[in-house]
């Protein structure tokens, strides 16, 4: 237990102008922690296994085809050991699917067994990229309904390069503090040079830390890992629930293996056809609108530190961040002693993931006005998956670079950040200057070995796509687009604020998803709750 929450339920990236990708963790209620705290020494990983052996299971006879050359991986048995929160095992996968004999890695798995008669295995992913599926499954009692847990083994895996699965660790904790706390909106040539130097240092460290794996952590490769996992679990079809970035992983899997798709739920959808700039622009607008909704709520609640007018309140946020840029605020009770503009921005953004956190943000902004940055730093720590002692619970803020830079390289001829800035400023007067720019991806040394041009997943059964109208990190339009892109996409809409819907919205959403997963009842396309 590290004194705060570890990875929670749904993550999505936000990219600053200086190019810092950060894993944004969705807060449930007033930053309610969903993931159980883990003792990594008790979780089976590439470094070791639990001493108490529970069982070994060989895959049942499968009717789905095994890709040629991958028989060893598809036919492996999983040895499940008791561990904190469930049963753990490791799955062996090739580093390079195009050269499977050239080396392999082990992926950490955690299974929470069905409470009753087992219907199948539900593989889950909380997003990121960089979120831990092991932590997500470990929190199954809080993240998934009792009805789902009664009939499904909930199975989480840490994707390649993430957490316990050959993690890509470029910077140590102190360096990550400098990375997150650095200036997210360089104002002059000197500050631009500092940002460039930091990105170059980070990229060089990643290249040195994981030279063999760095070019093989794409979402396509993670999706191929999921098919190996499906076979090792003895399932002819993959039942899956992915949140946020997990919807991109799910859509990728469905496009590669439409014949192996079972019950698929994609909650907080990411449009897989978007470019990197389009993702950033969409998020800029999403966070702008969510923040406007917060400011209105703050005003309605009375004594709002941002004033009594929404437009003025948004401008006050701009002014506040500019002031913190010039004069960082003191922080107490943390190894970080100053709240910089970078940390303050994270503290504001994280509260947009769930409206239950809005009162905490109001209190933090009031404290900041009184000259104390400690409360905003507290919020920023949730965003960075960090505790007050300066310890990061995983590598989400680093793995997210490795995955995104492979998945969404900027195409040749794309507009420069400078050319795009007026559009960002128009869409998001507060956040536009922070969310525009390539950063490290502009100098990333690797490219993906495989790409996908068609995300229609032709031949797959119905795939449930869930969108939230006030989602800041994965704007609602992306869910509409993904449901339309998938040949069998079915759109389910939650009218509300915050990131993702399942487990944090209403019974209409939860019942529709549960009915789909358990009884194969497909909701009416376009159902709004």
Image (tube, rainbow, N blue to C red):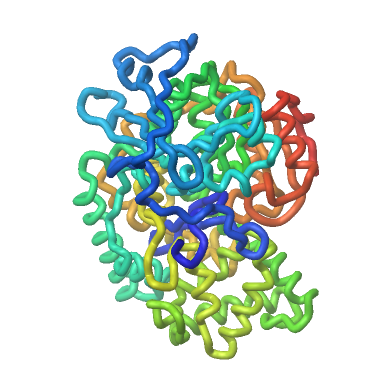
Name the quadrant containing residue 52: top left
Most foreground residue, 123 or 423 = 123
Name the quadrant containing residue 517: top right
Quarter of the image with the C terminus in it: top right
Question: Residue 469, how many percent across, how many down?
Answer: 71, 50
- Residue at 42 percent across and 47 percent down: it is 414
- Residue at 33 percent across and 15 percent down: it is 71
Q: Which residue is most to the front?
A: 52
- Residue at 51 percent across and 80 percent down: it is 374
Up the image or down, 74 lies above or below 83; here it is: above
Name the quadrant containing residue 290: bottom right
Up the image or down, 473 lies above or below 252; here it is: below
- Residue at 54 percent across and 76 percent down: it is 376
Question: Residue 9, how many percent across, how many down?
Answer: 57, 50
From the viewer's perspective, tell me whether residue 413 is left or right of residue 511. Answer: left
Up the image or down, 144 lies above or below 289; here it is: above
Question: Do we see residue 127 in this rendering?
Answer: no
Question: Residue 527, how many percent across, how many down?
Answer: 79, 36
Most foreground residue, 139 or 65 = 139
Q: How many marks?
A: 0
Most foreground residue, 374 or 460 = 374
Question: Do we see residue 83 in this rendering?
Answer: yes
From the viewer's perspective, tell me whether residue 216 is left or right of residue 347. Answer: left
């Amino acid at each position: 237990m590290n004194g705060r929450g570890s990875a929670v339920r749904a993550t999505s990236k936000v990219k600053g102008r200086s190019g810092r990708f950060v894993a944004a963790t969705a807060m449930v209620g007033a930053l309610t922690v969903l993931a159980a705290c883990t003792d990594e020494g008790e979780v089976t990983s590439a470094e070791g296994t639990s001493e108490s052996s529970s069982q070994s299971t060989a895959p049942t006879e499968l009717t789905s085809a095994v890709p040629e050359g991958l028989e060893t991986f598809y036919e492996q048995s999983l040895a499940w050991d008791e561990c904190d929160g469930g049963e753990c095992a490791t799955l062996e996968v090739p580093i390079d699917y195009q050269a499977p004999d050239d080396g392999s890695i082990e992926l950490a798995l955690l299974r929470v067994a069905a409470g009753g008669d087992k219907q199948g295995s539900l593989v889950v992913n909380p997003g990121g990229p960089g979120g831990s599926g092991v932590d997500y499954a470990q929190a199954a009692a809080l993240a998934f309904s009792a009805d789902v847990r009664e009939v499904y083994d909930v199975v989480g895996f840490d994707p390649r390069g993430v957490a316990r699965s050959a993690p890509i660790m470029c910077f140590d904790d102190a360096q990550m503090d400098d990375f997150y706390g650095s200036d997210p909106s360089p104002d002059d040539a000197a500050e631009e040079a500092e940002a460039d130097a930091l990105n170059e240092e980070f990229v060089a460290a990643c290249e040195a830390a994981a030279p063999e794996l760095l070019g093989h952590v794409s979402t396509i490769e993670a999706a191929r890992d999921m098919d190996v996992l499906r076979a090792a679990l003895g399932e002819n079809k993959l039942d899956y629930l992915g949140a946020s970035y997990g919807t991109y992983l799910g859509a990728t899997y469905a496009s590669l293996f439409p014949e192996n798709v079972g019950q698929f739920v994609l909650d907080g959808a990411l449009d897989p056809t978007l470019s990197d700039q389009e993702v950033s622009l969409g998020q800029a607008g999403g966070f702008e609108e969510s923040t406007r909704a917060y400011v209105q709520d703050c005003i309605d609640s009375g004594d709002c530190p941002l004033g009594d007018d929404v437009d003025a309140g948004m401008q006050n946020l701009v002014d506040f961040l500019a002031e913190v840029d010039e004069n960082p605020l003191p922080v107490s009770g943390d190894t970080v002693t100053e709240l910089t503009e970078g940390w303050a921005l994270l503290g504001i953004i994280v509260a947009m993931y769930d409206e239950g956190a809005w009162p905490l943000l109001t209190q933090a902004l009031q404290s900041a006005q009184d000259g104390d940055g400690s409360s905003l730093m507290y919020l920023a720590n949730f965003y960075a998956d960090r505790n007050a002692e300066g310890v990061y619970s995983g590598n989400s803020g680093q793995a997210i670079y490795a995955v995104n830079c492979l998945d969404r390289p900027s195409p040749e001829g794309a507009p420069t950040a400078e050319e795009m800035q007026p559009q960002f400023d128009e869409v998001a007067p507060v956040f536009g200057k922070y969310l525009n720019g390539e950063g490290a991806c502009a100098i990333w040394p690797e490219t993906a070995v495989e790409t996908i041009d068609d995300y229609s997943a032709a031949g797959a059964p119905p795939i449930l796509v869930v969108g939230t109208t006030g989602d800041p990190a994965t704007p609602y339009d992306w869910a509409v687009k993904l449901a339309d892109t998938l040949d069998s996409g079915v759109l389910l809409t939650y009218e509300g604020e915050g990131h993702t819907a399942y487990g944090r919205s209403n019974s209409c959403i939860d019942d529709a998803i549960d009915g789909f997963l358990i009884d194969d009842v497909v909701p009416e396309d376009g159902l709004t709750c």
